[in-house]
Image (tube, coloured by chain):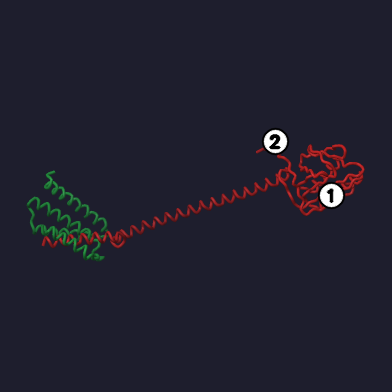
Amino acid sequence: MIALLLGLLGFTLVVQLRTTSTDPTSAATRQEDLVRIFSDLDSREKRLRQDIESLEESQRQLRSGEQGRQAALEEATRRADELGILAGTLPARGPGLGVRFEAGSKPISAYRILDAVQELRGAGAEAMQISGGDGASVRIIASTYFLDGGDGALVVDGRPLTGPFTITVIGDPTTMATALKIPGGVAASVAGDGGTVIVEDREVAEVSALHAPVKLEHARPVS
Amino acid sequence: MIAVLALLAGVVLGVYLDPTVPAALQPYLPIAVVAALDAVFGGVRAKLDRIFDDKQFVVSFISNVLVAGLIVYLGDQLGVGGQLSTGVVVVLGVRIFGNVAAIRRHLFRA
């Protein structure tokens, strides 16, 4: 009897060990344990779902922040380009005019050139350069000055140019051409001195001469 | 000697046959095994104390297994099966430890 019982014990022991080792998961688990495991998994899933939501939210925020930065960068680049063209530190191209001054009996005076530049600015010129007869070019910006150099020459920003002079200008061609040709205007004045102004429409005017950037010593931005 | 051989025979049989436990018995089998182990260790201790009695062993073995199964069954019916079986295992574990300590004292005099 004892032997029978012990044999039974050994048998069930092995069977039980086998059962738990081959199937340690759900089949050998009680119903309430399964319910507990299930609810644990449920709450875990809920937590993970919340995590996903918050992470997606932060991803959205980061993405919109990045878009904002990108837009700001594009705007800043655009402004830098505009300012570079205005300051003469960047080459520019676009529709415009070539204005050629040919001297007659009297040389073309710096006063006439300045007049023409002012007139072109008034007509909406965006970028200008002046070239001499030998091909040397000087960018015309806000601080550019013109002096008579004697013997028909012209000093522009410290550089002597010889005639005939050509101003290449980017802007609305018809407006600028009209501005130069008004009665009593630039063309008329030069003609009065015996010279000629040849205005030539250009589909693509190249303003490639550059002005070295000015390092400001005194002025500081107000911010 | 016969008892040890029978135990080994049961083990070999279990390994050889490899039966699956019926689903209805699954919660009770581990508890029954632990209860039987308790009875066996009690028997060994009694043997060493030279007060071993065949009838007492058989009765304690069977009653142990039945009572353990009954408690777990009752617990399952009351909805506290998990906790009750844990309690049964703890109690039987304490008893097994006590019996093993007594056996150890007999064998090693320490």
The amino acid type, in three-letter code, at marker 2 is Leu
Looking at the image, residue B44 sits to the left or right of residue A23; the answer is left
The amino acid type, in three-letter code, at marker 1 is Ala
Q: Which residue is mark 1?
A: A179
Q: Which residue is mark 2?
A: A216
Looking at the image, residue A123 sits to the left or right of residue B46; the answer is right
In the rendered view, tell whether residue A190 sits above or below residue B43.
above
Q: Chain of mark 1?
A: A
Looking at the image, residue A12 sits to the left or right of residue A106; the answer is left
Query: Which percent across, then down, holds residue A115?
Result: 84, 43
Count of numbered circles in the view: 2
In the rendered view, tell whether residue A158 sits above or below residue A187.
above
Quadrant of the image containing the C terminus of chain B: top left
Judge by depth and name the residue closer to the eye, A104 or B20: A104
Residue at the farthest front position: A134
Q: Could you say which chain is coloured red in the image?
A: A
Q: Chain of mark 2?
A: A
Query: Which percent across, then down, holds residue A214?
Result: 71, 38
Circles 2 and 1 on the same chain: yes
Residue at the farthest top position: A218
Q: How would you rate the neighbour count of disc 2 (Cα within 10 Å): few for under 14, some for 14-19, many for 20 or more?
A: few
Comes first in the chain, label 2 or label 1: 1
Q: Colour of chain B?
A: green
Secondary element under disc 2, as helix, strand or loop, is: loop
